[in-house]
Amino acid sequence: MDDVEELDRLISEQRNVRSVELDKLDIEDILRLINDEDKKVAYAVEKEIPNIAKAVEACLRSLKDRGRVFYVGAGTSGRLAVIDRAELLSTFNIDPRRVMAILAGGLKAVYGPSEAAEDREENGAKAIAKRRVSKVDTVIGISASGRTPYVIGALKEAKSRGATTVAITVNPDAKISKHADIVICTVVGPEVIAGSTRMKAGTAQKIVLTMLSTTVMVKLGMVYSNLMVSLKPISFKLRERAKRIVMVEASVNYEEASRVLEDTNYDVKASIIMLKTGIRYELAKKSLEEANGNLEKALTVAAGLKNKFKNAG
């Protein structure tokens, strides 16, 4: 089967019968048509929740077993991977060596076209080999078409090294699926502009990546209740958010939250423990270490330490 025949078979490359006169529509009608098509994305993602859950479990196994999670993609898919990984750093303060994004063409491909970089399987395989991927790692290949050589090569190499492999695509029976232990296929249908997978396909990929990574972070203890207690306070906005989190959870005013956060170098979890239990910073840190960073468990440990030292005194 030649490339033209193969493309004809892909749902993401077919013409959308609803948009064949797209160029003749008024501005608002174009926007409504795009919006109507976008509404289909959430339902397509919903059908894949069981498979997204399997991917979450795979990532958790890797991150709890001193392994790593890799996103691999090209073009729009790769850029979305870079965005998702970047946001994990400030939102959850995850070690940047634990979750990584591999984009065909490297960083220059983030800012402009570099699609030619995706055309060779061996380049994807080399990227995986360079990072010494092993059986404790999880590699997530992202390709709307499901036929991107770079991503296929990466998944093949990762699988040969014993890593858990995940494919994210919008086309059933996609080539990358053959090299994945877990397949997430959000069938969103033909694009408003035929083959422009930056549209519904890209939206579906963004939703899947956000759901997947957020759930992983929650289950790693990076979230307490629904509060962003692991955030990295690298900006004024995030420092103010940290104060609000401490105020809400520890039931203190702005001034008290600010004082304790400044004393702990904006360690939100330790600040909450100190304010809720009355222990000093060193014991709060010890509690977090014993609880592997889980704030709920650390509060229980902290209460025990407080009683221990109170009785000893």
Image (cartoon, rainbow, N blue to C red):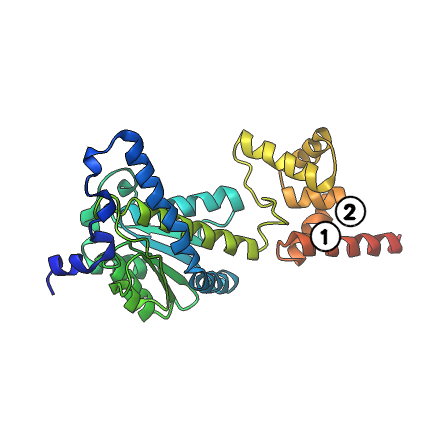
The kind of residue tagged 2 is: Thr
Marks 1 and 2, the one that precedes in the sequence: 2
Q: Which mark is residue 162?
A: none
Q: Position of residue 156 (x, y in %)?
A: 28, 66
SS state under label 2: helix
Query: Dot 2: few (<14), some (14–19), or many (≥20) neighbours within 10 Å?
Result: some
The kind of residue tagged 1 is: Leu
Q: Which mark is residue 299?
A: 1
Q: Which residue is mark 2?
A: 277
Q: Position of residue 55 (x, y in %)?
A: 44, 62
Query: Residue at 78% of width from left, 53% of height from top?
Result: 303
> Would residue 77 be seen by someone viewing this image from the given angle?
yes
Q: Is residue 181 above or below residue 267?
A: below
Instruction: Give the quadrant of the N terminus.
Output: bottom left
Q: Quadrant of residue 238?
A: top right
Q: Position of residue 80 (x, y in %)?
A: 35, 46
Q: Nearer the viewer, residue 40 or 299?
A: 40
Q: Nearer the viewer, residue 190 or 96?
A: 190
Q: Nearer the viewer, residue 93 or 81?
A: 81
Query: Residue at 63% of width from left, 42% of height from top?
Result: 267
Query: Residue at 75% of width from left, 53% of height from top?
Result: 302
Q: Position of residue 48 (x, y in %)?
A: 41, 60
Q: Are marks 1 and 2 in contact (CB under 8 Å)?
A: yes
Q: Nearer the viewer, residue 96 or 113?
A: 113
> Would residue 78 be seen by someone viewing this image from the given angle?
no
